[in-house]
Image (cartoon, rainbow, N blue to C red):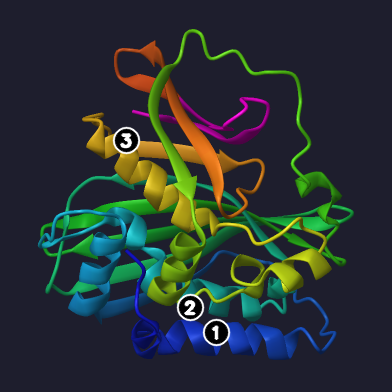
């Protein structure tokens, strides 16, 4: 079900952040040295019940008094970006490469949350910065209810998309894997996630702009895809409290994907997301 554009009224902080990043991208500011861990704590966060309910509806979930743990970017990303801006990092060139999400407790709806965002390590390479980030969300019942480690790089120069043109390889053997779901990632998925999260980057919404950026067309948000896969695993009665994924190739809108798992041990399984032809690996990781 597609979300309503009226949801943008709840995304003021994220929209301000996006416009601030765009404005700063027009200036070339000197990078400030990373000398120590940066962090920010925010108390008394109460996510909008309307947004949470619409998020659940988009994912075809039953209405619940529990906030989906993968909704954490909603209350954390504006603050995380502020930390990056304090170093004058070129955040308009950030690439989300994946996430590890550890769920220690439920996040109750209509309850005050506490969030701590951290940039605890930054490594500089010739063409990019690799940033290690952590977002910890606490509630009254648990001090570290949901902990997210974010994998990201920030490119120093204009993004070269040649590595994201869905280079296909030989067929991937899925003989020992279990097929969990085959789904189509639609334009409505991208539109809904943009409205629910405030991430209105046009590469997710406008084919023409995505092509100007060197892509074949509009692509799905990384964390939107993450949420869909998370819930497909749950719907298949696969139980886990930790999920760790790496985004390898973008998923273009209106493309079909296959979600597979494979057993490593009694409590750990590999996770693979392939294209329909099984010639392209979009995502890899594990659950346990």
Pair 2/3: label in front: 3
Give the magenta-colored segment's residue range. Answer: 271-288
Q: Closer to the camera, 36 or 135?
A: 135
- Disc 3 is placed on an element classified as helix
The x and y percentages for residue 235 are 24, 37
Specify the label residue 233 is tagged with.
3
Compared to residue 244, the image places residue 225 above or below, namely below
- Asked if labels 3 and 1 touch by Cβ distance under 8 angstroms, the answer is no
Q: Is residue 119 left or right of residue 169?
A: left
Specify the label residue 17 is tagged with.
1
**Which residue position is annotated with label 2?**
78
Compared to residue 274, the image places residue 32 above or below, namely below
The x and y percentages for residue 202 are 64, 74
The x and y percentages for residue 263 are 39, 14
Q: Closer to the camera, 203 or 247?
A: 203
- Asked if labels 3 and 2 touch by Cβ distance under 8 angstroms, the answer is no
Compared to residue 254, the image places residue 279 above or below, namely above
The reply to whether residue 46 is visible in this rendering is no
- Disc 1 is placed on an element classified as helix
The x and y percentages for residue 272 are 51, 29
């Amino acid at each position: 079900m597609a979300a309503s554009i009226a949801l943008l009224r709840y995304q003021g902080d994220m929209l301000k952040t996006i416009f601030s990043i765009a404005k700063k991208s027009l200036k070339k500011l000197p990078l400030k040295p990373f000398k120590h861990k940066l962090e920010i704590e925010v108390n008394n966060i109460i996510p909008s019940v309307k947004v949470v309910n619409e998020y659940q509806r988009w994912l075809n979930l039953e209405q619940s008094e529990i906030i989906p743990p993968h909704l954490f970017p909603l209350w954390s990303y504006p603050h995380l970006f502020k930390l990056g801006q304090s170093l004058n990092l070129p955040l308009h060139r950030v690439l989300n490469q994946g996430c590890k999400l550890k769920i220690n407790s439920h996040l109750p709806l209509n309850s005050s949350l506490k969030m701590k965002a951290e940039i605890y390590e930054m490594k500089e390479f010739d063409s990019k910065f690799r940033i290690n980030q952590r977002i910890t969300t606490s509630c009254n019942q648990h001090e570290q209810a949901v902990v997210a480690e974010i994998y990201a790089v920030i490119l120093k120069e204009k993004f070269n998309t040649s590595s994201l043109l869905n280079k296909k390889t030989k067929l991937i053997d899925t003989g020992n894997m279990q097929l969990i779901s085959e789904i189509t990632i639609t334009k409505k998925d991208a539109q809904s996630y943009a409205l629910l999260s405030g991430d209105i980057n046009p590469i997710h919404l406008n084919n023409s702009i995505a092509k100007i950026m060197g892509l074949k067309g509009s692509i799905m948000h990384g964390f939107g895809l993450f949420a869909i896969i998370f819930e497909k695993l749950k719907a298949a009665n696969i139980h886990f409290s930790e999920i760790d994924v790496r985004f390898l190739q973008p998923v273009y809108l209106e493309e079909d994907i296959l979600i597979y798992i494979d057993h490593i041990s009694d409590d750990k399984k590999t996770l693979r997301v392939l294209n329909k032809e099984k010639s392209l690996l979009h995502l890899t990781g594990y659950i346990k």
